[in-house]
Amino acid sequence: MKLKVSRELLLKPLQIVTNVVERRQNNPILANALLRVNSEYLTLTGTDLEVEMIVTLPITTPHDGDTTLPARKFLDLCRSLPELAELDLSVDKDKAVIRSGRSRFTLATLPAADFPEIETASAQTELLLSQSQLKSLIDQTQFAMAQQDVRYYLNGLLLDVHPERVTAVATDGHRLAYSQLTLATGVSVPVQAIIPRKGVTELLRLLETTEDKITLQLSSNHLRVRLPQVIFTTKLIDGKFPDYDQVVPKHTNKSMQVNRQALHQVFTRIAVLSNEKFRSMRLQLTKNLLKASVHNPEQEEAEEEMEVMYSGEDVEIGFNISYFLDALAAIRQDEVVVHFTDTHHSCLVHGVNDISSRYVIMPMRL
């Protein structure tokens, strides 16, 4: 196998593929990237058996062939070369020689035939949407995923596909993030898929804020996203996601409206002195006034007042300040509404006149 390619053409695709390669694994070939060359294309593949990334590059070479190279070493070599450098790669038996200018590197290879590739069932659901639409759904919800929860289905993000909408939902049992996109999906029966954390992370890294169309394919156990030159595949979490509609408060009797950025700044300042373990915050609401306060085991305290739009009865309620900051950071409107009922019920946060993205936060005992 022989290959001649510019550093600039290779660098970004190699980075995309290497992102999914685990640093530590039991199978040595999983540290490698698969390279396949034919007369028109170079295909790079990386996998950890849960997530697979395939990138195809247009090239011209008379030498077909395939091999696997240590992914991170190959990427680091490409990064270290000067801009506009040309790489000549040739493979002989179990060695690959890379030449560029006066530089020469020899890397160990493993047989391409031993490289594992994810086998997926045929897609049962397929829909077309833009990169920015899918990126927005993930961006506005992924932070609420659980981390290493024994309820394994919470360690991922739900995609709920209906005929006229796609909804993304994430929850760790203490808060919930919900974002909905109105879209004619073409499905007749609703379909749900739980994407694992690593799949969510890599997909979010891959997507760009463009209107370029992508194809999303769902089978019984895999999600595949087809982008220009890239095919992303992830296994799905097998489990039953909670009924999120039951979690979203429907009948609240108190509402506060406030500037999102101003509230975020207040919470950011007082969070410095919050309890590092519990992150608890006390909110006291009176007519058109919010007082937020925190304290920690070192007997340190922070308190701040700000004007808000509120005309309900006085209320005092506790929340995890980090959960509030995450929700405020995800909302895009300048003004937000916070709906309360009492100290025992969750609050609901969303942008003014926009309920496409909503955030539910459970209260804490004060």
Image: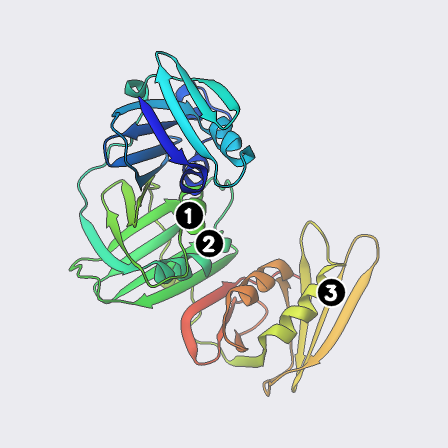
Label 2 crowd (10 A; few <14 / some 14-19 / many >=20)? many
Q: Check the image and name the residue furthest to the left.
A: 188
Q: Which residue is mark 3?
A: 270
Is residue 316 in sight in this rendering?
A: no
Q: Residue furthest top?
A: 93
The Cα atoms of the two marked residues, 3 and 1, are separated by 31 Å
Q: Quadrant of residue 170?
A: bottom left
Q: Amino acid at mark 2?
A: Gln
Quarter occupied by residue 122:
top left
- The residue under label 2 is 142
Q: State the quadrant of the C terminus.
A: bottom right
Measuring 37% from the left and 21% from the top, which residue is drawn there? 90
Amino acid type at image mark 3: Ile
Binning the other alpha carbons within 10 Å of mark 3 as few (below 14), some (14 to 19) or many (20 upward) gives some
Between disc 3 and disc 2, whose residue precedes?
Answer: 2
Relative vertical location of residue 95 with respect to residue 326 in this rendering, above or below: above
The residue to which callout 1 is attached is 200
Q: Secondary structure at mark 2?
A: helix
> Rounded to the nearest whole Å, what is the CA distance between mark 3 and mark 2?
25 Å
The residue located at (59%, 64%) in the rendering is: 324
Element class at badge 3:
helix
183 in relation to 243, above or below: below
Q: CA distance from mark 2 to mark 1?
A: 7 Å
